[in-house]
Amino acid sequence: FNSPPGAHRRNTMSRVNTILGMILSFVFIMAGSQKITDVIHPDTHAFLANGAKSWGPIWAPHFRTLMTTLTLDEHTAAAEKILLDDGSKTYGVLLKNIGYAEVVCAAMLLVSMFSGLATVILSCIMAGAVYTHMQLDEPYVPPAVLLTLLIIKLILPKGSAASSEKSAKLKKKGSNKGPSKKD
């Protein structure tokens, strides 16, 4: 093999990135699904739904501040009902929205074109989870570990060295052709 220096290492890191993406995708599909429905494991869904009652009061003031900053005060009540709580003070809407975001981003992790965006969105969700658990004086290690893995995924190389080497060879081969002859 006549590979450029570091190509093997880059290719290995790219594979690690892909495998990490698959593992994170599975984790977030499972975690998000638990937030959306009680079909998979009713006890876990009930535990999360009960926890959401304390998440909402932490995030509602931040949401209102954001809406004021964006000068959207007149839309705050409607946006709160769509994104945080339907008025029941259970914050089930917030729970489901987080779950939907996790499941959609988990699927996006598997498509290289959207993987970076999904990783950034999931990192924001995990940063919010760490903040929430710290505010509630609850263990925050699981979301912190997921946040760390997401950051590692962002840092690792995305493309394989083999594909960039092929691309470079094709460019070189194309540039060696002489002027085309026209009839």
Image: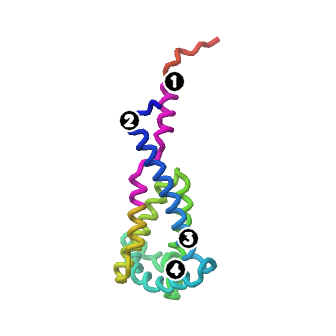
First along the sequence among labels 4 and 1? 4
In the image, residue 173 sits, relative to residue 79, either above or below, namely above
The answer to whether residue 5 is visible is yes
In the image, residue 104 sits, relative to residue 10, either above or below, namely below
Q: Which residue position is annotated with label 2?
A: 5
Looking at the rendered image, the disc whose residue lies closer to the viewer, 1 or 2, is: 2
Under tag 4, what secondary structure?
Answer: helix
Q: Which residue position is annotated with label 4?
A: 81
Could you tell me how far apart the alpha carbons at marks 3 and 1 are, in whole angstroms? Answer: 47 Å
Disc 4 residue type (three-letter):
Lys
For residue 30, which numbered disc appears in the image?
3
The answer to whether residue 70 is visible is no
Q: Is residue 160 magenta?
A: yes
First along the sequence among labels 2 and 4? 2
Disc 2 residue type (three-letter):
Pro
Disc 1 residue type (three-letter):
Lys
The span shown in magenta is 150-172
Q: Is residue 182 magenta?
A: no
